Amino acid sequence: MEHKLELMERIRSMEHLSKGQKRISDYILQQYDKAAFMTAAKLGEAVHVSESTIVRFAIALGYDGYPQLQKAIQEMVRNRLTAVQRMEIAPDIKTAEVLSVTLKSDMQNIRNLQDNINPKDFEKAVKTMLTAKRLYILGLRASAPLAAFFGYYLTYIFDDLKVITQGGSEVKEQLARMTEGDVMVGISFPRYSNRTIESMKYAKSLGATTIAITDSVFSPMGQTADICLTANSSMASFVDSLVAPMSLINALLVALGIEKKQELSAFFEKLEIIWNDTAIYTDPNVKQ
């Protein structure tokens, strides 16, 4: 994924542009929020050039074609879009098609996760969490459910754990005991939570190691973290898909569970006795 400054600099550094290419570059530089969601044909109409000229411009920038350039522009603006703008640019899908289109998009996000995740970063994140003196999980607003789910299962693995899913200025208060040797896992996707980004920076200032779960290494979260794990959260109307991030979190939990298998098994044996005594779960042998 492209970082805004990198993409803009690539466009500005292009030399010997034709008149048509100059109109394309000017339009993208000045109105990239509109260009991000135009087809090659629509962009061509807007700047009065042919669709093939748009494609050649994308290739001249170093992309395989226009779709790759469009994706780079979209990544550049995603964190700037308001909920109203998301509704405006959402594809016009018939209600009968929503389920199929949404499921296909989610499956593509998981395929992208499988193809693009860096195994070394994943392993490093697991090892870092395993050696943490104290582990903090932070996810606010739309990322709060991810943090809550992650934290729920991590309580079975770690004794010293703090999960933060809400709070304004007092979030830093909840990090007050953080010291060197602690680990902070911050979760945030576009539109990125300023509070989460500030907390990640604060954690680093206290000597903690920071791990980001976000959509891009070039995002504000990715640039702040010591370790960055990425998963797509592609936009569907005003809603972000968190299927791929959840799958990534599941993988982290499984990996941590494998590393702590003996301790975890012994702990679950104790818990099963407690759950049975307190009738936490239904008895499969009893007819309802």
Image: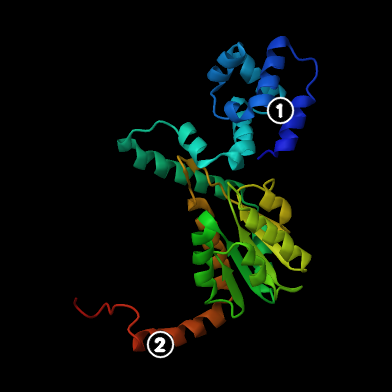
Query: Dividing the image into 4 quarters, which one contains the C terminus?
Result: bottom left
Residue drawn at (44%, 84%), measured in percent from left and top? 271
Residue reaching furthest to the left: 287
Q: Position of residue 254 (x, y in %)?
A: 53, 67
The residue drawn where x is 33% and y is 78% is 281
Write down the residue under mark 1. Answer: 62
**Upstream in the sequence, badge 1 or badge 2?**
1
Vertical comparison of 209 with 21: above or below: below
Question: Circle 1 sits in a helix, a strand or a loop, which is it?
Answer: loop
In this rendering, does residue 120 appear at all?
A: no
Give percent across and percent down for residue 264: 53, 79
Q: How is the image coloured?
A: rainbow
| Picture disc at residue 274 | 2
Q: Tell me the kind of residue under disc 1.
A: Gly
Q: Is residue 16 left or right of residue 268?
A: right
Q: Where on the picture, by quarter, is residue 163?
A: bottom right
Q: Position of residue 33 (x, y in %)?
A: 60, 30
Quarter holding the N terminus? top right
Q: Residue 227, position in %: x, y? A: 70, 58
Place residue 273 in its image quadrant: bottom left
